[in-house]
Image: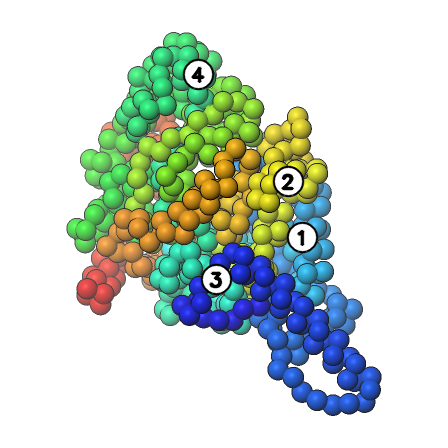
Amino acid sequence: MNTTHPAENPLKKEDIMKMMKRTLSILLTIVVGIVLLTSCGQSGSSQPAVSAGGASAGDTQSASDKGEPTKVVFAMQTFNVVPPTETIQTVADEVNRYIRETYPEVNIELEWVLYGPGDYTKKINLMMQSGDQLDIFIPSNIATSLSTNQLAPITEALETYGQDLTAIIKEYCGDDVFETVTQNGEIMAVPANKNMGLAAALTYDRDMLADVGFKDEDITDLDSLEPIFEKLREKYPDVYPFVSTDVANKNLPYYFYAKEQIDSIGNDFGVVFGDSGKVVNLFETEEYRALCEQMKMWYDKGFMPQDMATSTMRGTEYMNAGRGFCTYASYGVREDYTDFGKMQSNSTGRNIGAKKIGDPYLTTDFASAVLGIPSTSKAVNEAIQFLNIAYTDEYVYNTLLWGLEGRDYVKVTEDTVDYPEGLTADTVPYCAFMTMGEWGTESYMWGLEDGKTEEEKQANRDYALTVNKTIPKSPYYGFRFDGSDVKNEITALTNVFEQYAYPLMCGSVDVDSTLEEFNKALYDAGLQTVMDAKQEQLDAWVAQNS
């Protein structure tokens, strides 16, 4: 595969695919030539070709000679219904078959694991603590993962086995994207190759909206929802106007962070507003209190499920069943959000709309939709080999997203799919397309057929290539807090956060008394120590980069 430096020759999608095929052809020609020369008793030399994994052709062996493949365990979080283990295995089997046939020089075997958002982090931590094999995962917070030494350095592995992966990410996201995942000179994670700015958006039932006398354009931000919710409660008493995308409404603060231009610089325990340069306690601010009070009001008026702080039922499940009006999500920045609504409509059979309700604000943390290699992994190189393929081969990526053709999806055009007749995302045996914003090359994803013309689809692809370079960025973009000296405090603070912040975001507790207890518990757990460490490191970074 190509080893040209991305700054010298930026790669396009079609160029990468052509180079993959051409490299494989060259590789096979060389291997055949060596066999013929050997059989004739001749000797000679040739320049080795570069393989998909980054090793030279002179180092490759046939599948029968290489021995057992190295297993790579990839545990992914999915917002779709988690399929049975045996169904997931059929998808992994197809990916492994394809890799064996297309990349014979790569001797790996994928074990693909899917968990729901409600228990993903706990499952991952349990795998690490119990010694179970885990080679690729999504850190819930990369700063915390770094401070607790959960991540393996991967600079050398990327240089050897991930040249194409590195090149395509830099092409889409800019040369500085790896700075957001670098600590002490070492790259510690692989960014998702996607539109990095997460714009706050709502997906909602358009029929219900019209039925209570409102239009799409009436939805502008969170505050605009209250009169709509009031009418919905009157007309549909069994429907919750707002349902959480995940457990405990964890995603909603992303809207708040972007709206207030807050940089969490690694975690929630000490943040910076705008360009102030001052690290403050978010949970003592009037802005955070106002958000909590809004959620409390929604809860008291019955706008949200009363058990949202503990329920594992996803917002999409409520909406699919006609029991929820809208849910919050963060989507990549684009000019037109109607395609997200069409995607949900195709998945659910309901008339779903999508509307942006906030602008993005790019920080190091928001750019950190990443995949990590655990420090416990014995297959770091092989994990990078797999990701090098998955980020640059659209068949591998889309098979893991959509499943098996004919059973889980049908091709409509070269880059669009649909569900088999009579099936939806929730009823096909396998669907994991809602993992696409967490990993891989987003522009390679086959979309659901939405009636767009080729010109419109190309406009979206072109927009994705440029938007990462135009999104408003925090003045501290690229700063990575090193919390290794305060990891005990961060662990204690995380426990406090989960105890108090989730109920506050679900509106199920008294705001005044809970905030008072929350902040006392934070300071008792070492918040000031962490904030002081952040301030010191941030000041040094600003001085160095000013």
Crowd class of label 1 (few under 14; some 14 to 19; many from 20; radius 10 Å): many
The front one of 204 and 345 is 345
The answer to whether the residues at label 4 and label 2 have Cβ atoms under 8 Å apart is: no
* Mark nearer the N terminus (3 vs 2): 3
On the picture, is 248 further left or further right than 415? left
Please state which amino acid type lies under the numbered disc 3.
Answer: Leu
For marks 1 and 2, give the one nearer the viewer: 2
Kind of residue at disc 4: Met
Which comes sooner in the sequence, label 3 or label 4? 3
Identify residue for label 3: 11
On screen, residue 28 above or below 322: below
Query: For the residue labelled by badge 2, is the local secondary structure a helix, a strand or a loop?
Result: strand
Of the image marks 1 and 2, the number of the one nearer the N terminus = 1
Q: CA distance from mark 1 to mark 2?
A: 18 Å
Picture residue at 39% right of the left edge, 62% below the top:
178
> Residue 179 placed where, x, y %?
36, 62
Q: Does residue 33 appear in this view?
A: yes
Residue indicated by mark 2: 411
Q: Please, which residue is most extreme toward the top here?
A: 234
